[in-house]
Amino acid sequence: MSTALSRGTRSRSNLPSVFSGDPFNALRNEFDNMLSTWFFDNAPTIPAGFSPSLDLHETDTDYEIKVDLPGLQANDIQVQLSENVLTISGERKYEKTDDKDQEAKKSGTTHLVERFYGSFTRSIMLPGAVKQDAIDATYRDGVLCIKVPKAEQAKPAQIPVKS
């Protein structure tokens, strides 16, 4: 089994993620790579799209989402919220050298491409009501951090116990 298949199916915990993308995506990519190798004499293959990994953390006041997006610029990323579904999308371009460029010819031949390129979309349903007008998204060192404040009714209320 190749590293692409095992990397694509590895889980961060023993529980299946309710936020994961297509479960057959890694298998499909592996099959495409295998066919490409058989029919195109080990020509470099470019995986079609990818599904970035993310973490969703809840505090008393907000939801914090961290998404791994190495190699992108902030202007390559779109974040939208609609009906409590947060959608992160964008595109990572394939870094292809121009075959006509003399420097590219001197630099060698690519035999394997494992970094993911292409368009991506991840959507997650937030567990509770949120303040849409106070969402903050920052991108630094390849990680997109989104802080989504909870709506007042979603925050836990302290209820005094009387004796």
Image (cartoon, rainbow, N blue to C red):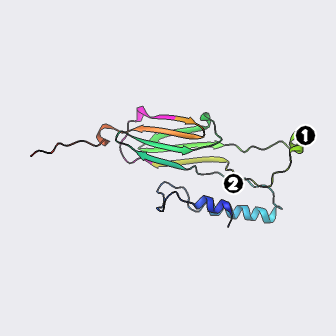
Disc 2, SS: loop
Q: Is residue 45 above or below residue 162?
A: below
Point out residue 84 in the picture as x, y percentages from the top left corner.
Answer: 41, 44
Q: Report if the CB atoms under discs 2 and 1 are less than 8 Å apart.
A: no
Point out residue 8 in the picture as x, y percentages from the top left corner.
Answer: 61, 58
Say whether residue 101 is visible: no
Magenta-drawn segment: 125-137
Q: Which mark is residue 47?
A: 2
The residue located at (52%, 48%) in the rendering is 54
> Hey, what amino acid is under mark 2?
Pro
Point out residue 45 in the picture as x, y percentages from the top left corner.
Answer: 75, 55
> Hey, what amino acid is under mark 1?
Gln
Q: Which mark is residue 102?
A: 1
Name the foreground residue: 36 vs 13: 13
The residue located at (41%, 32%) in the rendering is 134
Count neighbours of disc 1 (C-alpha within 10 A) and say few if under 14, some if 14 to 19, many if 20 or more. few
Q: Quadrant of residue 70?
A: top right
